[in-house]
Image: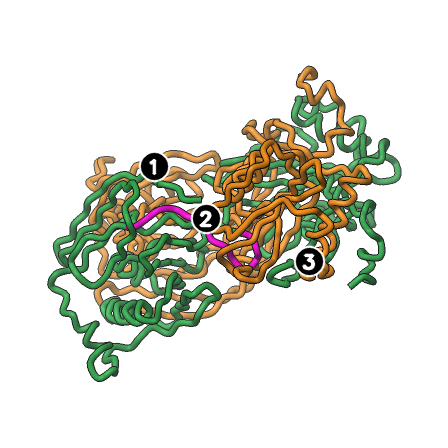
Chain colours: A green, B orange
Amino acid sequence: MLRLLRRSSALYSKSRNAYAIATQSLCGSSAINPSVGTEPCFSTLFQRFGVSEGVKVRMMTPFNIRCISIPVNTPPFMEHAITENNAPSVKLLTASNDDHGGVIVDLKDPMDSDLFVASLRASLLLWKQQGKKGIWIKLPIEHVNLVEAAVKEGFWYHHAEPKYLMLTYWIPETCNTLPANVTHQVGVGAFVMNDKREVLVVQEKIGTLQGKGLWKFPTGIINEGEDIFVGAVREVKEETGIDTEFVEVLAFRETQKSFFEKSDVLFLCMLHPLSFDIQIQELEIEAAQWMPIEEYAAQPFIQQHHLKYGLDIFFAKTHKGYGGFSAVSTRSSFSNKPSHLYVNSSYLNQSLLSGNDS
Amino acid sequence: MLRLLRRSSALYSKSRNAYAIATQSLCGSSAINPSVGTEPCFSTLFQRFGVSEGVKVRMMTPFNIRCISIPVNTPPFMEHAITENNAPSVKLLTASNDDHGGVIVDLKDPMDSDLFVASLRASLLLWKQQGKKGIWIKLPIEHVNLVEAAVKEGFWYHHAEPKYLMLTYWIPETCNTLPANVTHQVGVGAFVMNDKREVLVVQEKIGTLQGKGLWKFPTGIINEGEDIFVGAVREVKEETGIDTEFVEVLAFRETQKSFFEKSDVLFLCMLHPLSFDIQIQELEIEAAQWMPIEEYAAQPFIQQHHLKYGLDIFFAKTHKGYGGFSAVSTRSSFSNKPSHLYVNSSYLNQSLLSGNDS
């Protein structure tokens, strides 16, 4: 869906190299891309794009957040580097094609920033001639000297991890269809009950609950690349030493702006205990115990309105046959990547679940 | 849980300012933080940390990804700037305290990189004296000239969005407990059926399904800050013009490494149609229609094993009383932020749902 973005204006100039970085607010302007020349450039609107998953992704903020004029004193040797004799005199950046008509540059070796600019400009010219669309450059933190140069050539930030920064650039004059960054943190809370109707609870040694005497279920954040059902079992093991097996997701809660502007989804999981001797993680956990569920429920903090939902769910699970979502191993329909489907499997075709129906 | 990270080694030197950026692999080394001086520094191990949500978060990769020696030719005026006459001669960075003993710097105005370095060093000294822990610096893309300087002073990347880069620094000699970046993209798929047992399906104009003639449910990615139940309704409206109301989440699927190293969770949602005249989104959608569910199911692509789960779920919903998770407005237990709990609410205490039991 096309969307207009409102942006503030900022003008910035630098004496060493005559250029301007400006942002303009747009309404219906056609797309013009930064090119070798001195004309200011304007870009376009926000749009959606389909990807290999068969699920459309959010569009990135278009690069018209900033418009960059190429310095007037830059010799046009880049064009000569490509067109004359068809023999580039500047080394092009090594890139691989992605699945959407773009390229990815994974810069491994250090480079002088001036040489990088020369290579980048030559490469952009070539990619433009080749009809490439989105350009991705992954800069390891060791190559931080190239970040400013990339941004001044029209790239903008896409995402970052401790060891690298990913920047992107959109070549065509059509709407930018590059996918946006991820948006959610995923956590788990573990409901573990033994045969004596005692639930596994902990008191935390650090964080905002420190020293408050609250007994709560083990909780934690899923690691990157870790499945939800795996993370739940891991968290319980780490905090209490108790081995468990995942049963199902009983519910989940979504909260907005829980981590900067990002959101989080917390999956409340039911786990079945396989061991019972507690060994706490000294660094984070003050204490842990098996507590009668009635005692857990009687805590004043738990009696607050929103936490009573949890009690209701647990009671419904243990007394009313509440059906949660268990994990079924499958594959993503369009990318064929391994996946896990969380579903109330008691309703599903059992032959399908056993894999007999292929 | 303490974890060791394996890292590659890289050595880099720059002639203008004598420093070294090196990475070392560690095993059990104690934490030493970069300080004003010339000793190389080594950092520590990965660890977990509790935050205000009552949910522990993943730890960041410690800054010992790189060790930085302060240039020997840097005059120690920074210390003098703080200690002599207690009157700093260098302007400190404006910062606000966070909830975990750290500070956040949101740099608004442009700065010369040399002045920034001076202010940053003075500020770090002060924060260290004050016992501060994690330092966060948000650099708008307009201030890209400061990125290299920040990294050379010991900061590393935390996350980025198109318009800014967030960098962090850990002051104490204890384990770095800063939370890691988010990990998941969240999408929705919409199952919309009318009273004639026809399901709303689309053919996409772009992406990997383009031209394949496959009729699929409307799907899309949740926008940043958008609730799942809101996003599902929005996607259907955008793609087909059909108004709907959210009913429940029927299942969800998690796939790893679907977007660089990140994961995605796709929530399959049931929506109830409120209008029936289709108007497709021309940019992305080739066609849309109300299709008899038997015809949808008979498509060869749908008959593939993993997509049959969807058919099973839909049949169970329409014929067997399958219970999904509906959305209940609530608040996060520890941060008190507005949230939505997705749960099989038919099992819950109805007075609790109506808000009478506060």
- Nearest the viewer among B120 and B334 is B334
Q: Which residue is mark 1?
A: B95
The earlier-in-sequence mark between 1 and 2 is: 1
Give the residue drawn at x 20%, y 81%. Answer: A84
Q: Is residue B120 above or below residue B205?
A: above
Q: Is residue A209 visible?
A: no
Above-or-below relation of A55 to B24: above
Q: Which residue is mark 2?
A: B282
Q: Which of disc 3 and disc 1 is earlier in sequence?
A: 1
Quadrant position of residue B337: top right
Magenta segment? A43-55
- Residue A135, percent from left and from top: 37, 63
Please state which amino acid type lies under the numbered disc 3.
Gln
SS category of the residue bearing label 3: loop
The crowd level at tag 2 (other Cα within 10 Å; few <14, some 14-19, many 20+) is: few
Marks 1, 2 in one chain: yes
* Number of residues whose C-alpha sits closer than 10 Å to that of mark 3, classed few (under 14), some (14–19) or many (20 or more): some
Q: Amino acid at mark 2?
A: Glu
Cα–Cα span, label 1 and label 3: 59 Å
Question: What is the chief secondary structure element of the magenta stretch?
Answer: loop
How far across and down, in percent of the image, does residue B9 sit? 44, 70
Q: Position of residue A187 (x, y in %)?
A: 62, 44
The numbered mark, 3 or 2, whose residue comes first in the sequence reads 2
Q: Chain of mark 1?
A: B
Amino acid bearing label 1: Ala
Residue under mark 3: which chain is it in? B
Q: CA distance from mark 3 to mark 2?
A: 24 Å
Identify the residue position indicated by label 3 in the image.
B299
Dot 1 crowding, Cα within 10 Å, few <14, some 14–19, many 20+? some
> Does the magenta run of residues contain A357?
no
Please tell me whether mark 1 or mark 3 is closer to you in this view.
3
- Marks 1, 2: nearer the viewer: 2
